[in-house]
Each structure stands twice: as C-alpha cells, then as structure tokens.
Image: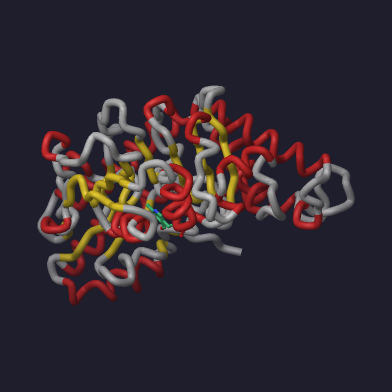
Amino acid sequence: MSRVYNFGAGPATLPESVLKKAHDEMMEWHSTGISVMEMGHHSKEFASIVEQAEVNLRELLSIPASYQALFLPGGGTGQFAAVPLNLGRDKAKFAYVHTGQWSGKAIAEAARYGEVQVAASSKEQGFTLIPPRSEWKFDSDVAYLHYTANETISGVEFQSAPEVGDITLVADMSSNICSRPIDVNQFGVIYAGAQKNLGSAGITIVIVRDDLIGHAHPFTPSIFDYKLQANEHSILNTPPTYSWYMLGLELEWLKEQGGIAAVEKRNIRKAEKLYAVIDESSFYLNKVDSAVRSRMNVPFHLADDTLEQAFLTQAKEHGLVNLAGYRSIGGLRASIYNAMSEEGVDKLVAFMREFEKTQG
Ligand SMILES: Cc1ncc(COP(=O)(O)O)c(C=O)c1O
C-alpha cells in the first residue's frame, strides 16, 4: 500500500492514525463482537461514542452551556435551508454576505423562504476580496446575518467574525471549522459538514444558541428542526452512525495534537509556505487580497495555463494528488486542512519549485 498526499477539497485527507484506528476497530469495536457500522443507534455502545464526540467538540471549541451541539444529516447544503427555516418564521428577512460560490448557493436557497438582502458582494471583483465591513448595508430588523467563513472554491477566508451588534450572526464554517480558535458567543448558529476538517462525509455539526431553538416554520422537515433534533439528542431517525464515529476519532486526534490553538499554528505555517512559493515568482499566481487569503484552500494559476495538465500529471507522479481547481473554475487548488501534514505541504512546495525550474 502506498498512500499519497491528497490535496482534495473534500471529502478530504484524514490523519493516518485516525484511519489506522478505524481499521483496527473495523471488525470489532471494544470487545462487542460487532463493528460500529453494525451497531444499533439506540444502543448504549453507540451512545458512548456520541457522548464522547460531543464532550470533545465542546471542549475543543469551548462551546458554552447555552448552546446545543447538534449532529445532523444533510451537509452544509441542508443547513442552507435549515437556517432560514429555523430562524425565519417571525422575520422572513435575512442578510447575506456574498463572497464566493458557497455563499451564493446559501443565498439562492434562503431566497426560497424569505427576502434576502445581499449586504455586500465581491462578485464584481471575481470573489478575490471581502468588502470592508463599513460598506455593508442591511436593515436592522433582519432575522440574521449569514456569512461564509471560508470560501472553499475562491480561497477567501474571514480572519475574524464580523461585528454585527445585536443581529444574530450565522456562519458557514464547512471548510474551516476547528482550524482556528473562535469565540462561539459571537454566533447564533455555526454549521459545518464534517468531510473537510473533521472527518468523513455524511454528518453536519450545527452549534446553535438555545434561544434560537423552537421557532421553526411549521413546514420545516422534522430532521431539520433544531428543536425536534435537540429533544432527541440528534437521533430523531437513524443517523449516519459510521460518520459520527469517524468524527469522534478525528476530534480525539485534534485533542492529541494539542487542541485548536496548536493546530492553528501548524495551519499558519503550512499556508505561509505555500503562498510564499506562489508569490516569489510570476510563474504561479493567486489573485486573492493577501489580507483574506484562505489558510485552508489555496487556489492558484500558472501564468502559462497550457502547462496545467503537465503540472497535475507530474505532481501525481510525485504522490501529490487532487490538485485540480474546482470543476467550473479550473486552475489549481491545494486544500490543506487540519489533517494535511506539514510534510505534505513541504513536498508540494518542493515540487512546485522544481516544476518551475524545469518548465519556467
Ligand atoms: C463553504 C461550504 N459550504 C457548504 C458546502 C456544501 O456542503 P455539502 O456538500 O456538505 O452540502 C461546501 C462544500 O464544499 C462548502 O465548501
């Protein structure tokens, strides 16, 4: 077996020790004689997996007791609908910041349930920046303001949560959750699919402040109703049990790494190394405003884009895979989530220098 460095945007690389643990426990989990995949979702064994995952998530993110941590199906896309459905019954007017393709999708979905005000947009600038907070415009009576903390495709990341006063702040952290410390108290809702920074596809983390629960539209599907799910400890129906278990393993691993502050330090170093090789010559290009470049997804182009295929082919020969940009955008992209080792980034950087030398 030879594992490669996987720079895919998601489902993304997992820590090798997590995969090994899952491998070791595949046939039999903790002397039960069965695999986690075969476990009943109401069993006491599965309950222990679920409880530990929540304890660890709460500890890692310092989630206050006044917030629920829900583990739901449906991915980030499910939450594009669940947020306006749960928060928009009394005020069907929402503000969204449009900084890329994913916030665009969130806006389109929310528009099915109420009036969307686009508070600010960087569409005209090709999603290469975040409009300054002083230029955002939205009514003071919106139900919430939504932003995408990290735009996975265009590689634009908020470096801190925007200041919105009394307005409920909602963040899509699908591609940067647990990659940097946050203050949960600043948010009404945080959501993220697990498949990039926290494990495998199928499970979505939703952290929601207690007072926002219990106001869903009556036509909200039960599995997306925060109150119904909170009442059932996120087991309203058969949940994605194996993904939940994988999430638990990844949270354990995060703790072993020294927690989020320690992981952030490594993430900063990884991103700095990659942007440095892009910036040091005109062979590679990244057009994102340097103040808001993503630490997780680094999109780049070759000045001579006819070399792109050769780049991808040779990278693969070096064990560096999934470096193609998003399918509708093209170019190249390296996703360097928590689980991408610094060694993997070093190898990529060395390959990029070598490729430039031979092709540049
Ligand atoms: C920032 C962001 N939000 C939402 C989504 C959609 O998530 P899902 O595929 O889990 O529905 C993605 C997927 O890549 C994403 O990157």
> Residue 39, percent across and down?
81, 52
Q: Is residue 146 above or below residue 310?
A: above
Judge from the rendering whether residue 59 lies leftward or rightward of residue 321; answer left or right.
Answer: right
Q: Nearer the viewer, residue 311 or 245?
A: 245
Ligand 1 located in image quadrant: bottom left
- Residue at the spot x=71%, y=55% of the render? 238
Q: Is residue 152 visible?
A: no
- Residue at the spot x=64%, y=48% of the render? 244
> Residue 313, percent across and down?
35, 73
Q: Nearer the viewer, residue 215 or 118?
A: 215
Q: How many marks?
A: 0
Q: Nearer the viewer, residue 110 or 196?
A: 110
Quarter of the picture containing the N terminus is: bottom right
Image-quadrant location for residue 176 = top left
- Residue at the spot x=20%, y=63% of the render? 301
Judge from the rendering whether residue 112 lies leftward or rightward of residue 240; answer left or right.
Answer: left
Q: Nearer the viewer, residue 204 or 215?
A: 215
Q: Colour scheme of this structure image?
A: secondary structure
Quarter of the picture containing the C terminus is: bottom left
Q: Is residue 71 visible?
A: yes
Judge from the rendering whether residue 308 lies leftward or rightward of residue 180; answer left or right.
Answer: left
Q: Is residue 52 above or below residue 76?
A: above
- Residue at the spot x=80%, y=46% of the render? 42
